[in-house]
Amino acid sequence: LFFAAMAQCSTVRIRIFPAARSENGLRSRRAGWVSPCGATHQGKNSPHREISSRPPAGGTLVLPSRHTKLSPHHKLPPRMELNAIIEALLIASQDPLPSDEIARLIRSRVAEAEDVRSREIEEGKESPPLADWLLALGQTDADRVNTAITSLNESYASHQRSFVILERPKGWKLYTRPEFGEFVRQLFPGRKPERLSGPAMETLAIIAYRQPITKAAIEAVRGVSCDGMIQKLLDRDLIRIGGRAELPGRPLLYETTDLFFEHFGIRSIDELPNASELRKIKLPEATETKDQAEQEMQLAFSAIGSPAASAGNDEAFADSES
């Protein structure tokens, strides 16, 4: 039952990364080109024409130095929508971003612009007022971010885009859709999809649904020794030692990691199939002998001292596992 429930949510997700740039810092686009500073140049009507309207013939981009005096036009960026700003942050960030952090980053940029304008006014310099749309961004909160992300996902779906924004325990991330996985894997020919054997999945499912849980309790459910399975799940960084139980011998407690949620595409344990029902099932009585306690201690030291297994080490989950 545990194994069947876990199998329902074993969807592979592959994260997308920002496109790489060439050595000279340029990256082609359908309607223009991109400079290393991120400004898009699209000809004579470009808002950045004072910098340059086209890449030089030699392919080298010459930008003004930081000491170059820019006109007030350059102090005010073109109008930016909240959706586009959030999308840019998610693409640029390697880590998940929670809604409140996204809102803080946006407000921070507005506050920075206000501080710059205040200093310029104090110095007697010309400084145009901030645009209304920029001031409105200063009121961004987590609810507005969530609404914008919902709008982005709806837009992606309606335009059949290849990616989607998903929420994970630590925040939002941009992912490619599963149906494009086989194409994306061609970028990494040396890597194989991680596969867990049946016994490994059973052990992981028991830990996921009943965490934190001792090794003796896991073995009471499975009916066989789980030393090997637990060690391999620790090596894969799918589980971790979460403390000690208030039981005789203080046995170790095991729980799932952030990588577990990432691998199965869920935000919390409550999103597992039939989570509330399965957690109510009474487990068999678990007893731990002195020998088992010593074995568990050795397992703990081994887990602390060994690095996580590489993504391509599928031999660790061979069909011969017990």
Image: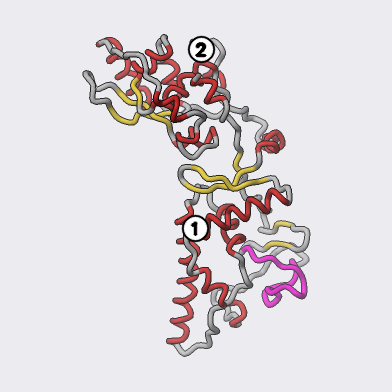
Where is residue 4 shown, x and y percent of the image? 54, 21
Q: Nearer the viewer, residue 12 or 303?
A: 12
Mark number displayed over residue 305: none
Query: In the figure, is residue 241 to the left or right of 190?
Result: left
Work out whether 81 lies above or below 201. Answer: below
Mark number displayed over residue 143: 1
Q: Give the crowd class for mark 2: few <14, some 14-19, many >=20 residues within 10 Å.
A: few
Under circle 1, the secondary element is helix
Colour convention: secondary structure
Q: Is residue 52 magenta?
A: yes
Of the numbered discs 2 and 1, the one sitting upstream in the chain is 1
Work out whether 293 lies above or below 207. Answer: above
Where is residue 266 shown, x and y percent of the image? 52, 37
Residue behind mark 2: 321
Query: In the figure, is residue 142 to the left or right of 71?
Result: left
Residue drawn 39% across and 17% down? 218
